[in-house]
Image (cartoon, rainbow, N blue to C red):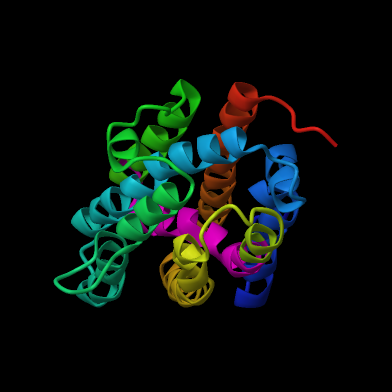
Amino acid sequence: MTTGLWDHETFIANLREVGGRAYHDKHPFHVAMNEGRLSPEALRGWVANRFYYQRNIPVKDAAILSNCPQREVRRVWIQRVIDHDGSLGNEGGIEAWLRLGEACELSHDELIQDRYVQPGVRFAVDAYVNFARTQPWPLAIASSLTELFAPDLMAARLAAFEKFYTWIERAGLDYFRRRVTQARRDSDEALAVTLEYCNTPELQRDAIRAIEFKCDVLWSMLDSIHHAYGTPNR
């Protein structure tokens, strides 16, 4: 890896290389989920634990906003908080995930009270929020670039749920449907910010490490979920 400043094409290629080798779509639990091999109990466990991540996304993004001195960046980034928390008359992603839980026969209280959250999931998500609070804001934004790989993941996940997990009401899958589009918009915005503000060799290398860290967070979450709910049957 060169020590000089990468041009944008090389920088983007290096960011994408991380996802090609480390994104959580390759985790055995995620592969099993997309192949329809999860039991209802295991799928509910994933939904319940993933909700802890979902509810902390706007907390993470608010931390980035609080550290960012650039008004034009804040005006773009604040939409992420609204997307997840919702606004008056507009359901957000957290509410959509609660409806997914209900479709999986998980109650609102079970999710809100974190009744099934595994310690490893809590640790990983809290580490991600802490990263956003304590690291330079361009690197916190770079860590979100796992969204580069999310639209394809969401489309595959939606197809798998509709094909294999027919016991889940289709209306409960609305979160996945909306994120196919939102994740593409979000990744374009985050990439533009990263390219503009990670503008030294050091910041570019740190941005690569930031997206690697985020991949580790997502992978560690699945490790904990996999450990809790066992290895699916083939």
In the rendered image, residue 99, in percent from the top left (x then y), is placed at 38, 55
As drawn, is 49 to the left or to the right of 160? Answer: left
Query: Is 80 covered by the magenta stretch?
Result: no
Residue 7 to residue 207: above or below: below
The total of numbered circles placed on residues is 0
Assign the magenta stretch its main secondary structure: helix
The residue lying furthest to the front in this view is 167
Q: Residue at x 48, y 53 (%)?
A: 143
Q: Quadrant of the C terminus?
A: top right
Residue 6 to residue 100: above or below: below
As drawn, is 196 to the left or to the right of 43? Answer: left
In the rendered image, residue 229, in percent from the top left (x then y), is placed at 62, 26
The residue lying furthest to the right in this view is 234
Q: Which residues are magenta?
A: 134-156
Q: Which residue is nearer to you in this view: 187 or 68? A: 187
Quarter of the figure with residue 51: top left
As drawn, is 103 to the left or to the right of 166? Answer: left
Q: Residue at x 35, y 45 (%)?
A: 135
The answer to whether any part of residue 207 appears in the image is yes
In the rendered image, residue 182, in percent from the top left (x then y), is placed at 45, 73
In the rendered image, residue 93, in percent from the top left (x then y), is placed at 35, 61
Residue 52 to residue 6: above or below: above
Q: Which residue is nearer to you in this view: 14 or 223? A: 223
Q: Residue at x 34, y 31 (%)?
A: 114
Q: Which residue is nearer to you in this view: 65 or 180? A: 180
Q: Residue at x 71, y 62 (%)?
A: 163
The answer to whether any part of residue 2 appears in the image is no
Query: Is 136 covered by the magenta stretch?
Result: yes
Residue 88 to residue 16: above or below: below
As drawn, is 55 to the left or to the right of 175? Answer: left
